[in-house]
Image (spheres, rainbow, N blue to C red):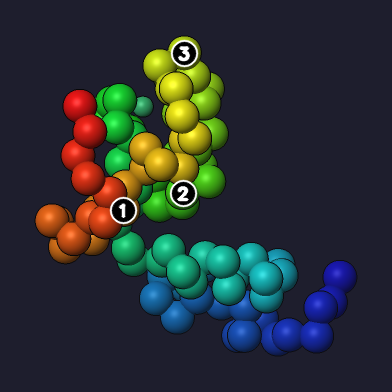
Amino acid sequence: MYDGYTVEEKTCRHCQKVYRWKKGLDRHLQECGKDPKFGCPFCDHRSKRKENLSKHIINRHGNQVIGPVDYLIREDTTASQSPIPNRN
Ligand SMILES: [Zn+2]
Ligand SMILES: [Zn+2]
């Protein structure tokens, strides 16, 4: 299998992970070295990817969710910058 990219081009410079597909590396680069920044509003679970956290919420807390899951997920950047107001 060859997708037109060399192994070097498919290796992460930060952690030396090698990907079979450039696409995989591209996706990895968006999260490599970063802390999980999406926090579950119901428990301590954290995720680097919003879609993964959405799945977690639906699977684990589906019965507690009333609105769209996306609305519940806040991105933990540099604190207090959340555009979403606290709702309790
Ligand atoms: Zn990496
Ligand atoms: Zn949770």
Question: Percent x, y for residue 9?
Answer: 62, 85
Q: Residue at x 28, y 49 (%)?
A: 84
Label 1 to label 2: alpha-carbon separation: 9 Å
**Amino acid type at mark 1:** Glu
Disc 1 marks which residue? 75
Q: Residue at x 70, y 67 (%)?
A: 20
- In this view, the residue farthest toward the left is 80
Q: Check disc 1 and report its element: helix, strand or loop.
A: strand
**Amino acid type at mark 2:** Lys
User: Looking at the image, do the residues carrying marks 1 and 2 touch, with CB atoms under 8 Å apart?
Assistant: yes
Q: Residue at x 56, y 66 (%)?
A: 27
Can you see residue 46?
no
Q: Check disc 2 and report its element: helix, strand or loop.
A: helix
Which mark identifies residue 50? 2
Label 3 to label 1: alpha-carbon separation: 22 Å
Disc 3 marks which residue? 63
**Amino acid type at mark 3:** Asn
